[in-house]
Amino acid sequence: MAGKSKGNAVIGQSGGPTAVINQSLVGVVQALRKAKLVSGVLGAANGVRGIIEERFVDLARLKPSLLERLAVTPAAALGSTRDRPDEEYRRKILDVFAKHDVRYFFYIGGNDSADTARIVNDMAAADGRELCVVHIPKTIDNDLRVTDHCPGYGSAGRFVAAAFMGDDRDVVSLPGIKINVVMGRHAGWLTAASALGRLDETCGPHLVYVPEIPFSLSRFLEDVAEAYSKHGRCQVAVAEGVADEAGKPIVVDLAEKLDAHVERDSHGNVQLSGTGALGDFLAQYVKKALGGKKKLRVRADTFGYLQRSFPGFASPVDAAEARACGHKAVEYAAKGAQDGSVAIKRLKGKCYRAGYFRAELKDVAKETKEMPRDMLNKAGNGVTKKFIDYAMPLIGKLPVIGLIK
Amino acid sequence: MAGKSKGNAVIGQSGGPTAVINQSLVGVVQALRKAKLVSGVLGAANGVRGIIEERFVDLARLKPSLLERLAVTPAAALGSTRDRPDEEYRRKILDVFAKHDVRYFFYIGGNDSADTARIVNDMAAADGRELCVVHIPKTIDNDLRVTDHCPGYGSAGRFVAAAFMGDDRDVVSLPGIKINVVMGRHAGWLTAASALGRLDETCGPHLVYVPEIPFSLSRFLEDVAEAYSKHGRCQVAVAEGVADEAGKPIVVDLAEKLDAHVERDSHGNVQLSGTGALGDFLAQYVKKALGGKKKLRVRADTFGYLQRSFPGFASPVDAAEARACGHKAVEYAAKGAQDGSVAIKRLKGKCYRAGYFRAELKDVAKETKEMPRDMLNKAGNGVTKKFIDYAMPLIGKLPVIGLIK
């Protein structure tokens, strides 16, 4: 590289990964190459953790063919982190950036990552350092503000919708009550996606429970009994984070009722992912309450990490948008070093098309976005057409199935 | 239909469904149409249960376009059953067959279905009735005798292999110990398929436990600790049916150790599928034993019914073979009404090609086929090249992924 160094860029990935988070990574690398904005492109191993530990990968050396393979690989190719930097940690980040002449920081993550990006950005500005910070959204939870939807959601939604389609056929084959637990602690977007593959009113899921609506066990039992008697089977989608009026997770309630044990982390939070407890408890509870002396087949599946990591099944729309978000991030950085977060809007027209704009970091940071009430039915146990119209274009074409009527 | 009736054919589907069981159904319907063997083609709703209850679907009326959609639809389009007919039940089957002039019975199922087919066949012969019974193999467990492999296995194996590939990338992103429970009560074929997507020695699954090898909790802990210290993470595949030397399911052992509860069915058998208990117990056990005061991330997923019902992800090889098995069944029936079970062999040559032959019902019925010892490594915690060479052609092309090294 002749002449004065243009400084370096650091890219990091953070939080729970998605099936297309590497599309955004590759988008940034591609666009940086094209824009010739920087001298070096460093990938931070495990997000901010890799920055303070100075564990960097030279991304400039990666061949285009490997980049394309990485783009279709689920989960964070650079490694991720759950760290939430405190004051000292953030100071260290800035010191490492100064040491490595880092002038651009691209951080791919959720609302916590946007918040980290915002604070690092403000600190750099206060110090008078030259640093441009751009946040690139990703989350299967689809719960970021400002943006119409989040890269990662479409692919997870596609997996969930397809899983419910196939599983419902399985339940038709061997009828009973089937409860499927879907990821989502506070927002029900992903659980709602379970309904996107319904071919008609007879198809499951017959009931959908999201965290936005307080969950009542007695009401749940009534709903299940009604659907079972109507359809001869009942397929249910339940968000892992469903909680009662007081905000107490249902898994805790059920554990008490069934005299069972739930796992908690070091902060006392109930562990929701990576365990089948909620599904198992709900199945036991339904069997006890509705089974009586009859042979009632009640089963539960917890879809778990496959929802965000299953390969070869990403939504093409989602993949393309995640890549484009990477390109846009570099565009904003190149255009007068504008900090911000890449956001998506729907362009007007008959067919779905996405446009991109720059949002302020502060507007995306910390707070999250739940499902609006009008995307959920009155009874609070299903979705409305408004949700279907919103989500359908994001997940791409679903597998074709046929029914004998 | 002019002239004397040629009699009718009944097709049924039985047992746990697969992603390609409807390919065989459609294969039979297509071949019966082409061969003009019978006057009517009746689909028995829910297998033998639908026969004795005379619940039949007229399959001759289904349009070719619907047949093709059904073929790619997971789970039994006609409905399935877990019924194991006794003497009286079987007598009823023959009576209904006589009433509806049924001269051909095609039964798509596992070893229990082959046994039912065998007995019904023998009874009809003893009575001097004209009845040709052909069994068509299906099972994700791949545990039928005589045939090289079973339709349904390749697609379930493809799902499991891909799931492990993506999940391993997820574990690289957020390192820890990840335990994935795979279907399989007695045979480890499907759990072994977890290893088919490994790109190199660093990739998971790092450990594979099948029911064929007695499971030792202490040995398991040692294995996990060793793999974790070597790779900085550990991804484990465990068959739901792993049991100790005495044949006691490990889930029972763990429940005692953790002072927890396991579900049992009315026969006292521990429920293995449709519950996350084994995975959750193993994760708790590992965390207790290895976590100490360190923050050790231990998670479990139970892949559940998605393994056999996920749509749009079938192995093309498996789908084609399942269809061909349906065609062959009609060929055997047309060729002098030969009873039997359709079996697959590998044809000699450099590339994988399948051939088909007629096996005797008695050779396929009841007994099952476990994994041979030489497909499992010496330590009993992984697979050998012999297994990879055996299974790889059956699952079709896996998704492409890339690794940064």
Image (spheres, coloured by chain):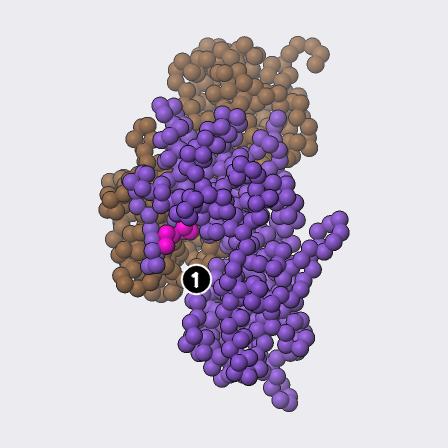
Chain colours: A purple, B brown
- Residue A37 x %, y %: 64, 78
Residue closest to the eye, B386 or B208: B208
What count of labels does the image hold?
A: 1
Q: Is residue A6 visible?
A: yes
Q: Is residue B108 visible?
A: no
- Residue B393 x %, y %: 53, 48
- Quadrant of the drawing holding the N terminus of chain A: bottom right
Q: Which residue corresponds to the image point at 46% horizontal and 28% vertical from the top-left?
A: A225
- Residue stretch in magenta: A269-274
Q: Which residue is mark 1?
A: B174
- Residue A396 higher or lower than A55, as above or below: above
Q: Which residue corresponds to the image point at 52% horizontal and 26% vertical from the top-left?
A: A230
- Residue A294 higher or lower than A278, as above or below: above
- Amino acid type shown at disc 1: Leu
Report the chain holding disc 1.
B
Q: Residue furthest right?
A: A349
